[in-house]
Image (spheres, rainbow, N blue to C red):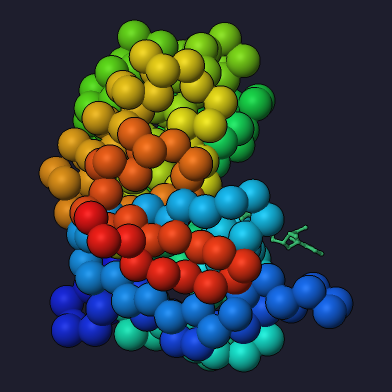
């Protein structure tokens, strides 16, 4: 079970986070609180700081000041190994260009996070099979990622992101490289699976349809985050 899931702290708490590259302030006093199983979209112009915020949340960038807590645990107080484990198991990501492992089959890509934490084979097989079924890819389980369509690759990436039952999925333009039919299918799947598994979703997107599956939509402008009136 994911650390801290049972206590009363919010899923994610961001308090007054600042980040600059040289003289450019990219995140300007960003604060945000996300409750468990909430789906939140961040929209805003190119260069406004959206990916930088996601990178800070994923532990890939370190804010200059401010506080980020995930399930009550402050990221800056965790060691590198713990942040890596968090990203692998509790706070997983999906991306515009999927980031699948090209030398592994579809099934092995989904299984990989469970192998890393040494789950027994029987459990791994059952979980992988169930998730491949949920994303409609059982028939493509032995294919390599390069043999899959863009929509199939993103469905596989979603299965891999969900296999460890994370508390939060970070999604950076998850429909950015898909046509509208595949994009609709991915969004429906993301909504359905995050609801079913009670997984939080924080999505950066330019796509109004994508933000439509979220319960809250925020706007980023010049490094500042503002809530939309829906
Ligand atoms: N590692 C870096 N070093 C220097 N500047 C950076 C770095 N990463 C991002 N930036 C700059 O910070 C600003 C914000 O970038 P960021 O990628 O967060 O924007 P974004 O809102 O995600 O944009 P897009 O919608 O185009 O992906 C941009 O001006 C970018 O050039």
Q: Determine the residue located farthest toward the right in the rendered image.
A: 22
Residue 147, above or below 25? above
Q: Is residue 208 above or below residue 219?
A: above
Work out whether 58 lies above or below 142.
Answer: below
Seen in the image, is 38 located left or right of residue 42? left
Q: Quick one: 97 or 77, which is closer to the camera? A: 97
Within the displayed image, which quadrant is ligand 1 positioned in? bottom right
**Closer to the camera in the image, 31 or 174:** 31
Percent coordinates x, y for residue 6 in the rendering: 17, 77
In which quarter of the view is residue 202 placed?
bottom left
Residue shown at 34% from the left, 34% from the top: 209
Residue 164 image position (x, y, % from top left):
34, 51
* Residue 208 lies in quadrant: top left
Counting every numbered tag in the picture gives: 0
Q: Quadrant of the N terminus?
A: bottom left
Relative vertical location of residue 2 with respect to residue 134 in this rendering, above or below:
below
Of residue 174 and residue 50, the one placed in the foreground of this image is: 50
What residue lies at 21% left-to-right and 59% top-to-bottom? 37
Quarter of the image with the C terminus in it? bottom left
Residue at the image position 26 percent from the left and 78 percent from the top: 10
**Residue 230 or 23: which is nearer the viewer?**
230
Q: In this orientation, does residue 63 appear?
A: no
Residue 74, quarter of picture: bottom left
Q: Is residue 30 left or right of residue 163?
A: right
Q: Position of residue 38 (x, y in %)?
A: 23, 60
Let me know if residue 150 appears in the view: yes
Name the residue located 27 percent from the left edge and 49 percent from the top edge. 214
């Amino acid at each position: 079970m994911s650390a801290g899931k049972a206590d009363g702290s919010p899923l994610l708490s961001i308090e007054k986070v600042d980040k600059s590259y040289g003289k450019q302030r990219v995140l300007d006093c960003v604060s945000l609180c996300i409750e468990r199983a909430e789906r939140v979209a961040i929209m805003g112009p190119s260069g406004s700081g959206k990916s930088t915020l996601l990178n800070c949340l994923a532990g890939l960038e370190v804010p200059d000041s401010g506080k980020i807590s995930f399930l009550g645990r402050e990221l800056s107080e965790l060691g590198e190994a713990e942040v890596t484990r968090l990203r692998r198991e509790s706070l997983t990501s999906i991306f515009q260009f999927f980031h699948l492992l090209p030398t592994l089959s579809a099934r092995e890509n989904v299984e990989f996070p469970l192998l890393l934490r040494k789950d027994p084979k029987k459990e791994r097989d059952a979980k992988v099979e169930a998730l491949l079924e949920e994303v409609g890819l059982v028939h493509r389980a032995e294919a390599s990622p390069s043999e899959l369509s863009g929509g199939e690759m993103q469905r596989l990436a979603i299965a891999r992101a969900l296999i460890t039952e994370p508390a939060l999925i970070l999604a950076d333009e998850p429909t950015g490289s898909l046509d509208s039919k595949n994009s609709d299918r991915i969004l429906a799947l993301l909504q359905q699976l995050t609801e079913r598994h009670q997984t939080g979703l924080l999505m950066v997107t330019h796509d109004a349809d994508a933000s439509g599956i979220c319960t809250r939509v925020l706007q980023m402008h010049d490094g500042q985050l503002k809530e939309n009136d829906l």
